Image (spheres, rainbow, N blue to C red):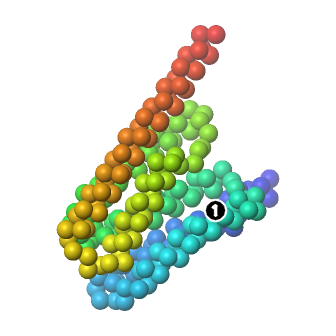
Amino acid sequence: MEKSFWREYFSIPNLMGYFRIFLVAVYMVLFYRSLNGAPYWPVIATIVISGLTDFFDGKIARKFNMVTEWGKVLDPIADKITLGAIILSLSFKYTIVIAMVAFYVVKEGFMGIVGLYSIKKGHKVEGAMWYGKVCTFSSYVILIALLLFPDMPEKWVDILILLNMAIMFCTLMCYVVYYGKILKTGTETERDEKAS
């Protein structure tokens, strides 16, 4: 039992996931210091390291048969925390990003609550849907572009942020439909079981 516990929660890919969450705190400190005149390159370096860790933890998990149920939960959590930290940090610099922070909280709050409710109802934990992956990827591309080009004209910043929010909104609507179908199916199954 002890061996399975360590395999489930402390495999190499999961340790890399914990490391990514730790890097979020490092990133926030470095970004805040950069606003006060500290070097900017460590901010970018932290994001690059986080991205590489994200890439390799999945590769290692699949290649060495280290995929775990906890890992399926931990990886998207690390993604969401990292993405949320980048959005929050940019809101210190660009006013328009404040609206994106609020929308991100609403979106992820909905996803978390409905996801937990779905698990409670007995549905298995699934990986992100394709539209969720597209949203995460596009968000990273847009936000990292803002980080890489800190002197980007405000007009382009506004366009990129509005585009990102539009993608996030479409993704949220897709998940509303997805979870609606899952929960409806679960409710109908429960009725059938009671009826029989």
Q: Amino acid at mark 1?
A: Gly
Q: Is residue 7 visible?
A: no
Is 47 on the left or on the right of 62, as rendered? Answer: left
Q: Position of residue 32 (x, y in %)?
A: 33, 79
Name the residue rendered at 47%, 81% in the picture.
45
Name the residue rendered at 47%, 36% in the picture.
178
State which quarter of the image contains the C terminus. Answer: top right
User: Total label count?
Assistant: 1
Quarter-of-image position of residue 157: bottom left
Q: Is residue 115 visible?
A: yes
Q: From the viewer's side, name the closer residue of 6 and 61.
A: 61
Q: Is residue 83 above or below residue 125?
A: below
Answer few, some or many: residues within 10 Å of disc 1's Cα (few below 14, many 20 plus, some between 14 and 19).
some
Is 59 on the left or on the right of 89, as rendered? Answer: right
The residue pinned by badge 1 equals 58
Q: Position of residue 46 (x, y in %)?
A: 48, 78
Name the residue rendered at 20%, 71% in the picture.
154
Name the residue rendered at 47%, 74% in the picture.
47
Is 4 on the left or on the right of 15, as rendered? Answer: right
Q: From the viewer's side, name the closer residue of 159 and 140.
A: 159
Q: Is residue 80 above or below residue 169?
A: below
Find numbered disc 1 in the image and state the secondary structure of the residue it sits on. Answer: helix
Residue with the most extreme top position: 196
Quarter-of-image position of residue 173: top left
Q: Position of residue 39 (x, y in %)?
A: 37, 89
